[in-house]
Every structure is written in C-alpha cells, then in structure tokens.
Image: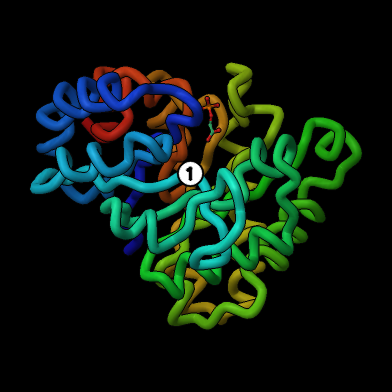
Amino acid sequence: MRTPFICGNWKMYKTVSEALAFLDAAKGLVAGAAGVEVGIGAPATALKSLADAARGSNIRIGGENCHWEKEGAFTGEISVPMLVEAGCAFVIVGHSERRQYFGETNETVNRKVKAALAGGLAVIMCCGETLGEREAGRTGAVVTDHVKNGLAGLTPAEMTKVVVAYEPVWAIGTGRTATPGQAQEAHAVIRELLAGMFGDQTAEATRIQYGGSVKPENVEEIMAQPDVDGALVGGASLKPDSFAKLVNFRA
Ligand code: PGA
C-alpha cells in the first residue's frame, strides 16, 4: 500500500526564525501521526536550521527548487549537494510557479529530477493544467506532457524515490479546489501513464499528491479518492494548527 505523504510548500514565506517557531509548535502536534509521511518544502535560507531542528521528529525537510549542475557559475541557484548537506530529504521540482515565473520547462524539470535522484534526494515532480487548458479540454494532454517529459529516461528503481504532484494551476492559492472527482480523474490518468512508462508495479507503488487549495476542511474528501496519495499544500501549511490538521486528516 502507498503511504500517504502530506507535504507543506512554504513558497517564499518564513524567515529562519519564523520557520523555527513553526517547527517548534508543529513537531508535537504531528508526532502521533501514524502511517503518514510528513514533509515541509521551505525557502533555502531556512533549510539547514529547519533540518537540524527536525532531527528526531517525523518531519522531513525539502528544498523548493534545485539546479541540475553540482556547482558552477549560476548566480542565485542552489545545487543538489547543497540541499543534501543542509539536511534535505527531498526537493520539489517543476512547480507551476517555477514554470510560469522562472521559465522552467519540461526539459529543465527532467534535468533537475535526474540530478536530484543522482544526488540522493527524493523528488516531488509537479504537473497540472491552467484554467484555459482545462476549459479547452486539454487537461489530460497537458498532464501527460508534463509527466512523460518530466520523468523521461528514469528507471523503475529511480521511480521509487519520485512522487508526482497533480496541481491544477487554477486551484493554487485561489481557494478554488478541484472537486474530489476532478482530482481522481486526473490522478487516474497519471497512474495509467506511469503504468505505460514504467510498468504496473511502479505505477501502483508511486504516490500521486493533489495540490491546490487543500485545507483542513477539504483534506479528508480529497484523500478519500483511491488514486490520491497525499497533498502538497501551500497556504494552509503555514500555520502549525492547520498543518497538523492536514497531517492528521484521518483523525
Ligand atoms: P495552495 O498551494 O495550497 O496555497 O493552493 C499549493 C501549491 O502551490 O503547492
């Protein structure tokens, strides 16, 4: 069975001290969550302090982006070895905000995914359609394009460290969540695609998170969908109480 993975995505929120205050409050609130993997994707400046403070807890810390080269003249970028040494367990790659504002393409996403895996990080690879694409009936095609090209060339063994996050762009930060049916429909498309790319066993084992306005009020019905194996959560992950309610979605 797939272990659900509830992960915060803090985006460009929280200084180091704010991040540590959150962790201090959240650790105890999520400590009892059994059978759930818990993660926080955090800004680069806070990663080392957060990872140090999270040691011994059930919260794993991850980066929100990485470069595909190990080092080099890439001003402003952060490499996989830097994330690893800071104590990260995973990295989020291909978020729609990265695609939209920072020119990320399927090709760079693919390079980043491969670099992260080679460097020992697990990966959350994001995919999802815009509102215009959904209205044009292109949801399946867009998600297929993101997944096929973002994960191109990976082996089934590498896929054991990959989580796919389905995040419809129109649902991110808008308060407009996909209905459980819409989420399930897209997740089923992704799982079938993974079966074609990597075989049934890998497809069955790969976790697919939903992201886009997940909050304590709707997490349970989203998580109840058979192909939804977790959530990637922005806004509702910023407060310890709310984050803990998401992690404890079964309670
Ligand atoms: P949201 O963001 O929960 O604030 O909609 C989700 C995400 O961007 O991962």
- On the question of residue 184 being in view, the answer is no
Q: Amino acid at mark 1?
A: Glu
The residue under the point 47% across, 28% down is: 234
Disc 1 crowd, CA 10 A, few/some/many (<14, 14-19, 20+)? many
Residue with the mark numbered 1: 64
**Residue at the extreme right of the image, as rendered:** 136
Q: Is 9 left or right of 68, judged from the image as shown? A: left
> Is 249 left or right of 203, judged from the image as shown?
left
Q: Nearer the viewer, residue 248 or 9?
A: 9
Q: Is residue 241 above or below residue 182?
A: above
Q: Nearer the viewer, residue 44 or 201?
A: 44
Viewport quadrant of the N terminus: bottom left
Q: Quadrant of residue 147?
A: bottom right
Q: Is residue 14 above or below residue 9?
A: above
Q: Residue 212 location, x and y as percent?
A: 57, 31
Image quadrant in which the C terminus is located: top left
In-image side of 180 versus 249 (left or right): right
Please, which residue is most extreme toward the front here? 73
Query: Where residue 109 appears, x then y in whole percent?
Result: 65, 59
Q: Position of residue 118 (x, y in %)?
A: 45, 75
The answer to whether mark 1 is within 8 Å of ligand 1 is no
- As drawn, 241 above or below 6: above
Q: At 63% from the left edge and 18% from the top edge, which residue is drawn?
A: 174
**Which of 149/87 is in front?**
87
- The kind of secondary structure element at disc 1 is loop
In-image side of 16 versus 161 (left or right): left
Q: Is residue 132 visible?
A: yes
Query: Residue drawn at (34%, 50%), measured in percent from left and top?
Result: 4
The x and y percentages for residue 20 are 22, 26
Q: Residue at x 70, y 67 (%)?
A: 148
So how many labels did they put on this image?
Answer: 1
